[in-house]
Amino acid sequence: MRLIGPEDLDAAVQAIEAGGLVVVPTRRWYMVCADASNARACDDIIAGKRRPSGKPLAYVATSTASCEERFILTPDARRLATAFWPGDLALLLPWKNAEDAAQHAAVGSPALVTIAPDTLGDLASAVKVPLAATTANISGDAGPNDPGPAITIDQVHAFLAASGLEPDVIIDGGVCPAANHMTIIDCFTPEARLVRTGLVHQRAISAALGTEIRTA
């Protein structure tokens, strides 16, 4: 396990491309990343997190253009992508091809797709494989005793000890200041629906769409 700074991204790129795991800071919290097409690596993350079946990892696209190569974007999805990507928003999008969906089963069908800023986005752009990511915590019920995803390196190490995961690289980004979720919008159907509130406010979503967003 190697601890590096955000400026030493090459080591993280090599680890992902070799089928390993990397822990990456975001402004929300630390994320565990793997090659989205590597079923073994993704299954290791899911097992370590004790993540329920049917709860996908996020697919970190590199641009709206690259996203459109694999996914179908409705007019609502395009409005939201234009307004908030890169950023703290994820869209549930249908795959264009069933073969792609099968090859990237860990990110679901529809897939949970985002374009990330900062280190996570830099990593997604640098690797030659599709990137999957999820929060560095044991899956829980988000109740009052749930500590939530790691926002410091010490909390990352506590998560790794509890999960048994052994990432090849951890990128130290200090304290993650926002400590909140991405907003999730379901764009599987023509009219977008709010699935989970987060850093992108519901009012901002409605403003971008030009109509009040409904809940899924």
Image (tube, rainbow, N blue to C red):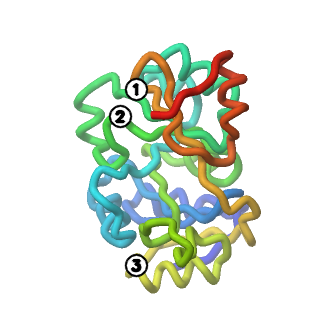
Q: Residue 165 falls in which quadrant of the image?
A: bottom left
Q: Are marks 2 and 3 in contact (CB under 8 Å)?
A: no
Q: Secondary structure at mark 1?
A: loop
Q: Mark 1 is on which residue type?
A: Phe
Sequence-wise, the earlier of marks 2 and 1 is 2
Sequence-wise, the earlier of marks 2 and 3 is 2
Q: Residue 19 falls in which quadrant of the image?
A: bottom left
Alpha carbon of mark 2 to alpha carbon of mark 1: how far? 7 Å
Alpha carbon of mark 1 to alpha carbon of mark 3: how far? 32 Å
Quick check: 7 left or right of 116? right
Q: Position of residue 58 (x, y in %)?
A: 46, 47
Sequence-wise, the earlier of marks 1 and 3 is 3
Q: Position of residue 56 (x, y in %)?
A: 37, 50
- The mark found on residue 110 in the picture is 2
Q: Are marks 2 and 1 in contact (CB under 8 Å)?
A: yes
Q: Mark 3 is on which residue type?
A: Ser
Q: Secondary structure at mark 2?
A: loop
- The mark found on residue 188 in the picture is 1
Q: Secondary structure at mark 3?
A: helix
Q: Residues within 10 Å of mark 2 (few under 14, many from 20)?
A: some
- Residue position marked by numbered label 3 in the rendering: 163
Q: Residues within 10 Å of mark 1 (few under 14, many from 20)?
A: many
Q: Looking at the image, how many numbered discs can be counted on the residues?
A: 3
In the rendered view, tell whether residue 177 sits above or below residue 63. below
